[in-house]
Amino acid sequence: MKPLGDVNEHLMKVHGMAKAAGADLVSAARTGELTQEEWAGIVTRCRSCDWDEGCARFLTRGCRETPVEIPEACLNRVRLAELAAATGNDA
C-alpha cells in the first residue's frame, strides 16, 4: 500500500478538480449535499490516488471558462460530477 500524499497538496487538487467540473463545494456543503465526513473522504481518496502526475498535468491547463468532464482516472470523478449537477454547474 502506498503512503498517503500531503493533505494540503491534495486539498488543492480536489478544489481544482471541483472547479474544473463546475462543482460549487461551498454551496453543496451549505445545502447538505456534501457532508464534512464525505469531504474528508474525498480528500483522503485523492491522497491515495495513483494518478497523481496525470492530475497535476490536467490541472496545469489552467482555468476554464466552462466546466469540463473530469478524466476517468480521477477517483473522485463521479462524485464531483454529481456535485456539479446538484449545484447547477455540470459539464
Image (cartoon, rainbow, N blue to C red):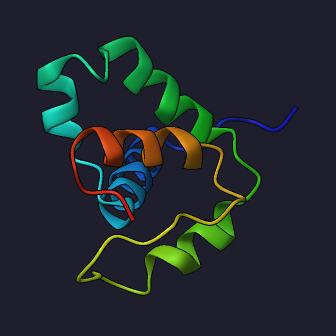
Residue situated furthest right in the rendering: 1
Q: Residue 42 at what x, y percent from top left? A: 49, 32
Give the residue drawn at x 88%, y 31%. 1
| Viewer-proximal residue among 53 and 64 | 64
> As displayed, is residue 66 above or below residue 47?
below
Give the residue drawn at x 57%, y 80%. 57
Q: Quadrant of residue 2?
A: top right
Task: Tell me the quarter of the image containing the C terminus.
Answer: bottom left
Q: Residue 60 at what x, y percent from top left? A: 44, 82
Q: Disc count in the image?
A: 0
* Left or right, residue 68 beside residue 44: left
Q: Residue 89 at what x, y percent from top left? A: 25, 56
Q: Quadrant of residue 4?
A: top right
* Left or right, residue 24 beside residue 49: left
* Left or right, residue 61 beside residue 48: left
* Left or right, residue 56 beside residue 8: right
Q: Residue 5 at what x, y percent from top left? A: 60, 43
